[in-house]
Amino acid sequence: MHPFLSADAVDDLRCLAAMIIPASARFGIPAADDPVIFADLLGSLEHDRIEVEAGLAHVRARAGGPLAGLEAGARAALGRSLQAEGEANVAVLGRLVMLAYYRDDRVVRSLGLEPRAPFPKGHEVEAGDWSLLDPVRARVPMWRDPRSSA
């Protein structure tokens, strides 16, 4: 039992997670509805509770009922439609699914990375092209200078 989601909402979120990130036999990685990944996801929802509840309500309304109750083709079409809509609360669900997914050691290993904290060893970061920031540096400041009397 989840602290604030109903069993139906948890089922909808599980189905949505699998739609967002399906398993890949080619890369040997699980879907986002994998029990370990999904448990991590469920444990990380409290901070975004309002958006999660609103996003799941929107998904259920668009599905006309339980998301898992839709035929696979209709579920895929709904997923494309939801993505095209860009509804903010549904986007929060996608962000939370991806964050939980990429915290999983199996997924990190599949990317060729060592599953560990970035410190104390650190990670090598390639030098980038700093000239890409020139248009940003050239902008007029968007803030008021606190030293000015205006």
Image: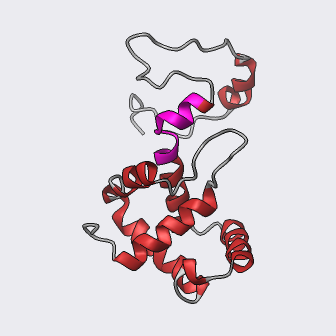
Q: Nearer the viewer, residue 81 or 29?
A: 29
Q: Residue at x 66, y 26 (%)?
A: 137
Q: Is residue 65 left or right of residue 118?
A: right
Residue 85 magenta-highlighted:
no
- With respect to residue 32, does 71 lie above or below? below
Q: Quadrant of residue 42?
A: bottom left
Q: Residue at x 57, y 23 (%)?
A: 113
Q: Residue at x 69, y 45 (%)?
A: 25
Exactly how many numbered labels are in the figure?
0
Residue 105 magenta-highlighted:
yes
Q: Nearer the viewer, residue 10 or 89?
A: 10
Q: Residue 106's spot in the image, x, y percent?
A: 52, 35
- Which residue of the protein is positioned furthest toward the bottom in this rendering? 64
Q: Residue 7's spot in the image, x, y percent?
A: 36, 76
Quarter of the picture holding the C terminus:
top left
Q: Residue at x 43, y 23 (%)?
A: 116
- With respect to residue 113, does 25 lie above or below? below
Q: Residue 58's spot in the image, x, y percent?
A: 52, 79
Q: Residues in magenta?
A: 99-109
Q: Quadrant of residue 86?
A: bottom right
Query: What colouring does the structure picture have?
Result: secondary structure
Q: Is residue 101 left or right of residue 70?
A: left
- With respect to residue 44, does 145 lie above or below? above
Quarter of the picture holding the N terminus:
bottom left
Q: Residue 124's spot in the image, x, y percent?
A: 57, 11
Q: Is residue 2 left or right of residue 116?
A: left
Considering the whole magenta stretch, tell me its main secondary structure: helix
